[in-house]
Amino acid sequence: MSVRSITLRETGEKFRVGKILCLGRNYAEHAREMKAEIPTTPVVFLKPSSALISSGETVIIPPISRELHYEVEMVVVVGKDGRAIPRASALDHVAGYAVGLDMTLRDVQADAKKKGLPWSVAKGFDTSAPVSDAVSRTRVTDPHALILTLKVNGDVRQRASTGEMIFKVEDLISYLSTIFTLERGDLIFTGTPEGVGEVRPGDRLEAELQSVGTLTVHVR
Ligand code: MG
């Protein structure tokens, strides 16, 4: 059964998850590997809260797909409501940080891109959003100086610094809040670095965000 809340590790405080806002192409090297243009404004899509699972749970490939990809990402947990939030006070709206996987049905997404259709199915299916517990913002000195790592069956597949993000956390909160009211418990997936690839049933994925935490899921 999906868990629809995120726990702040220090205090045990629970955040009921609302919308899950996700960034595409927020690392230049990943945009290049996808043969996509490097964006000048953020590329945004959504996952429903029903996509959320926690560490120890299983990612299930739906019958419409034969190609599941991992994307490791830093996840921002929104702690305070806001609209049109200035960049200078953006971090006041962050409760904490977590590590997440933007699981993607790459074959379904490629077909949608070709036909000019939305990504909702490719990105928003049940179990497509595994997220770790969160660490309080006050424990993270600089969210743009953390190493993100993803291992599949023990082998490192992705490893990069969050410093390579094109749009920083402050930019994303400021920009997104001009379009979507940000609410306590919303999550922001901040994009993946290069090295994305396929996983198959039986594979074990271990995601880590330095100083923040780890997340382990299996594929079925
Ligand atoms: Mg992604």
Image (cartoon, helix red, strand yellow):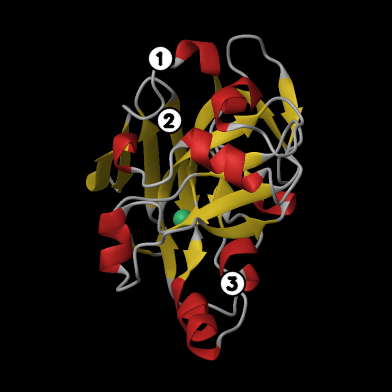
Disc 3 to disc 1, C-alpha distance: 34 Å
> Of helix, strand and loop, which one carries label 2?
strand
Residue occupied by mark 2: 214
| Residue 150 or residue 37, whichever sits in front | 37
Mark 1 beta carbon near ligand 1 (under 8 Å): no
Could you say which is closer to the camera, residue 168 or residue 149?
168
Residue 45 in view here: yes
Quadrant assignment, res 185: top right
Q: Position of residue 50 (x, y in %)?
A: 73, 52
Labels 2 and 1: the sequence-earlier one: 1
At horizontal 62% and vertical 76% (from top left) the residue drawn is 118
Q: Residues within 10 Å of mark 3 (few under 14, many from 20)?
A: some
Cα–Cα gap, marks 2 and 1 = 18 Å
Between residue 74 and residue 58, name the one nearer to us.
74
The residue where tag 3 is placed is 119
Q: Could you classify mark 2 by the number of other residues whose Cα lies within 10 Å: few (under 14), some (14-19), or many (20 or more)?
A: many
Does dot 1 land on a helix, a strand or a loop?
A: loop
Q: Is residue 136 above or below residue 108?
A: above
Q: Which mark is residue 43?
A: none
The residue shown at (40%, 59%) is 25
Which amino acid type is shown beneath numbered disc 2? Thr
Report the residue at 52% width, 27% height from top. 97
| Farthest-out residue, left | 155
Instruction: Give the distance between the C-alpha atoms of the residues marked 3 and 2, in whole angstroms.
Output: 27 Å
Q: Which residue is mark 1?
A: 141
Q: Nearer the viewer, mark 3 or mark 1?
A: 1
Decide if residue 138 is on the left or right side of residue 85: left
Judged left or right of residue 206, residue 156 is: left
Q: Residue 193, image x and y in percent? A: 32, 50
Q: Amino acid at mark 1?
A: Thr
